[in-house]
């Protein structure tokens, strides 16, 4: 009986032979890659097929797609204003990807892609890279003013490194937040599932007691569904906030 | 209707006049509706977790940067090993506190926005002026 709660996060190659190799490192087709493909295919199929009928009074599927669309559009509009809507496709894709990864991870027996820091760090580096590119494209070298707060010059010697580190912190805090939330939730579920198994096997009075952690799992599952949505939301809104700073620099300080 | 208008604009893009016009109409609509009603409220454990990650991430970045600078200097024959590590760790602490302060103002603004729209709603819906 595998009772290791961390076992669910192991990455296993699904095909024994590596697909190809980059600089001597073999690249395998893993369960993580499979889940990512499933997520991308499922979410794009759902979004395109659901809005296909284009009814004025939407069906349930169409209304789900429309609500998610409007939710992200409103979020970008309120966080960055008019010119932020250019980044709608980027932010909507990120939001849907993270959301679907989180939700597909909730299916028992599947794999949570966002519980891997490699994935979340890659996503957040993409976001920060985008912010830097957009900032330099919009403001040229003036983008560096982001790191210069309004202060007397002798304080700037101290404040510029602080602002610089504060900026470099973003990809890490963005990725760690998502990764740690998913990891913690799924570990908690597995630990309580382990309680059910060991109580059930203990015999006597304890077998009856196994129902208690079982009920708790149901409650945690509901909480995890909320967390899955909330973390996708937080990831998307922080992307908006960072893009807003790159677009408008110190306007909102 | 709002949905289809937006959908069209994003897909076929450009034409800034139409975009700003659409934005104005959207703003008008939005002021009529309860602002921020769709936003999930920040829950307390989420806030606590946000502060913790901001602080710790700044420490890691600061320490890592100092370590890297030391390594670079060591590479060129200057043995500064703990100096920059300690210096940047301290700067990292400051940056972490700055991050937490910034996150706190953001969350405060969000909560204030939610509350004001709630009281506005209450005022609008109440039978008394």
Image (spheres, coloured by chain):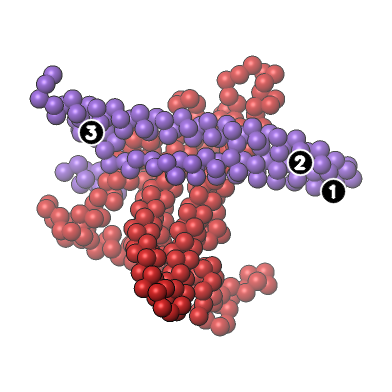
The Cα–Cα distance between marks 2 and 1, rounded to whole angstroms, is 15 Å
Mark 2 vs mark 1: give the one in front: 2
| Image spot of residue A106 (x, y percent) | 38, 64
In three-dimensional space, the C-alpha distance between marks 1 and 3, rounded to whole angstroms, equals 60 Å
Instruction: Say which residue label 3 marks.
Output: B34
Which image quarter holds the N terminus of chain B? top left
Residue at the extreme top of the image, as rendered: A152
Residues A185 and A87: in front is: A185
Residue of label 1: B75
* The color chain B is rendered in: purple
Residue A85 location (% of width, % of height): 35, 40
Figure quadrant of the C terminus of chain B: top left
Q: Which chain identifier belongs to the red chain?
A: A
Residue B115 in the image: state x and y as whole percent: 30, 30
Residue B56 lies, in percent from the top left, at 60, 43
Q: Residues within 10 Å of mark 3 (few under 14, many from 20)?
A: some
- Secondary structure found at label 2: helix
């Amino acid at each position: 009986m595998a009772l290791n709660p961390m076992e669910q996060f192991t990455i296993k190659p699904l095909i024994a032979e590596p697909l190809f190799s980059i600089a001597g490192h073999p690249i395998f087709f893993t369960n993580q890659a499979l889940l990512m493909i499933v997520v991308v295919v499922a979410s794009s199929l759902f979004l395109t097929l659901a809005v296909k009928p284009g009814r004025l009074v939407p069906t349930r599927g169409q209304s789900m797609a429309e609500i998610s669309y409007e939710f992200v559009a409103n979020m970008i509009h309120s966080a960055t204003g008019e010119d932020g809507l250019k980044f709608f496709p980027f932010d909507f894709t990120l939001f849907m990807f993270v959301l679907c990864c989180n939700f597909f991870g909730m299916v028992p027996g599947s794999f949570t892609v966002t519980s891997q820091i490699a994935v979340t760090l890659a996503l957040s580096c993409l976001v920060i890279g985008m912010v830097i590119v957009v900032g330099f494209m919009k403001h040229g070298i003036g983008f560096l003013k982001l790191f210069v707060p309004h202060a007397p010059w002798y304080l700037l010697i101290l404040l510029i490194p602080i602002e610089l580190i504060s900026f470099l912190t973003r990809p890490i805090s963005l990725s760690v937040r998502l990764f740690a939330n998913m990891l913690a939730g799924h570990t908690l579920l597995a630990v309580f599932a382990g309680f059910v198994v060991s109580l059930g096997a203990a015999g006597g009075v304890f077998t009856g007691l196994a129902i208690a952690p079982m009920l708790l799992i149901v409650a945690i599952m509901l909480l995890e569904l909320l967390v899955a949505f909330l973390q996708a939301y937080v990831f998307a809104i922080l992307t908006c906030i960072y893009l807003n700073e790159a677009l408008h620099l110190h306007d909102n300080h | 209707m709002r949905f289809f208008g937006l959908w069209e604009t994003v897909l076929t893009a450009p034409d800034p006049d139409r975009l700003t016009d659409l934005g104005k109409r959207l703003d008008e609509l939005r002021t009529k509706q309860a602002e921020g009603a769709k936003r999930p409220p920040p829950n307390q454990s989420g806030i606590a977790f946000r502060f913790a990650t901001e602080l710790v991430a700044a420490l890691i970045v600061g320490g890592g940067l100092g370590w890297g600078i030391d390594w670079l200097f060591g590479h060129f024959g200057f043995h500064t090993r703990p100096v920059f590590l300690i210096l940047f760790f301290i700067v990292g602490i400051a940056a972490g506190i700055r991050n937490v302060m910034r996150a706190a103002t953001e969350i405060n603004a969000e909560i204030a926005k939610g509350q004001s729209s709630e009281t506005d709603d209450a005022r609008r819906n109440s039978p008394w002026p």
